[in-house]
Amino acid sequence: MVSPPGFQRARRPEQVEARRCAILDTARAMLRVRRVADISLRELSDTVGLAKSNVLRYFDSREAIFLEVMDENWTAWLDDVSTALTSAPATPGPYGRETRVATVIAGSLVAQPGFCELVSVTAGVLEKNISVDVARTFKTRAAAHTSRLAGLVRAEVPHLDDVAAGHFAHAVFILVAGLWPYAVPTEAVSAVMAEMRMPPAGELFARGLTEGLVNQLVGLSARATAGAAVTG
């Protein structure tokens, strides 16, 4: 394939990094207005101004590009969660701590639609066309991110053990993956939902995610408390 006019191969490390950043910046921008399934490697390459073969010099595949974007979003999201948990007001009533933590996490995800989109297609799309090296890197980072979320939850709900906190951290992404596709319906489905006087899909996603996470964390907390009472 012939390179676009003006293309110069990146040779120095800083040139390679600049080219990678340009590709990632383009992927981020496209993701803000498009779903992953609607963004082809060819379109992404054309938008960057590189031939598809040249983009593949820097990333193994289209999927590897979006996994890199996802990792960056994951880190930024966890930073936001950490800050939000320390500033969120207390929630009164039974299991107020658990309700507050789960609600904060759900709200932070609702505010990050691009991240939710990537989470929803990780297993079914983004992990399907990658090399062993890319898979190893992504899974290692994902495990670290999940452990960090579990640690943030344990700091707020200290009677949870590592296993329970880890279970909740995994459940967060399972719920997002399952619910997010329904948050972005087609025009036809949106029209029918309006006819049926159903709430907007985004509102249903926020409600479902919040309720699901609250129930998960309250249930894990109740089990931990009951277990401690029995052993005590």
Image (cartoon, rainbow, N blue to C red):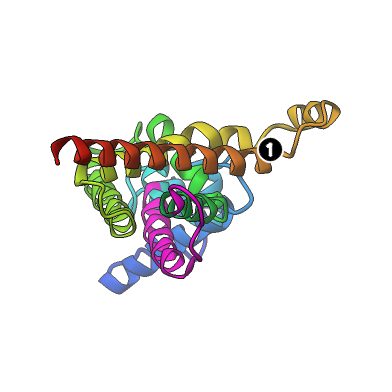
Comparing 197 with 50, the one in front is 197
For the stretch drawn in magenta, the main secondary structure is helix
Q: Position of residue 23 (x, y in %)?
A: 45, 58
Comparing 199 with 66, the one in front is 199
Q: Residue at x 31, y 38 (%)?
A: 130
| Residue type pointed to by label 1 | Ala
Q: Is residue 220 left or right of residue 62?
A: left
Q: Position of residue 21 (x, y in %)?
A: 41, 65
Residue 46 higher or lower than 229, as above or below: below
Residue 43 higher or lower than 82, as above or below: above
Q: Residue at x 61, y 46 (%)?
A: 34
Check disc 1: other Cα within 10 Å, few if <14, some if 14-19, many if 20+: some
Q: Is residue 1 magenta?
A: no
The secondary structure type at the circle numbered 1 is: helix
Q: Position of residue 57 (x, y in %)?
A: 33, 52
Q: Is residue 183 visible?
A: yes
Residue position for label 1: 201
Q: Is residue 71 magenta?
A: yes
Q: Is residue 185 left or right of residue 90?
A: right
Q: Residue at x 77, y 29 (%)?
A: 193
**Which quadrant: the N terminus?**
top left
Q: Position of residue 142 (x, y in %)?
A: 29, 47
Comparing 141 with 42, the one in front is 141
Segment tinted magenta in the rendering: 67-96
Q: How many marks can you see?
A: 1
Comparing 95 with 68, the one in front is 95
**Which quadrant: the C terminus?**
top left
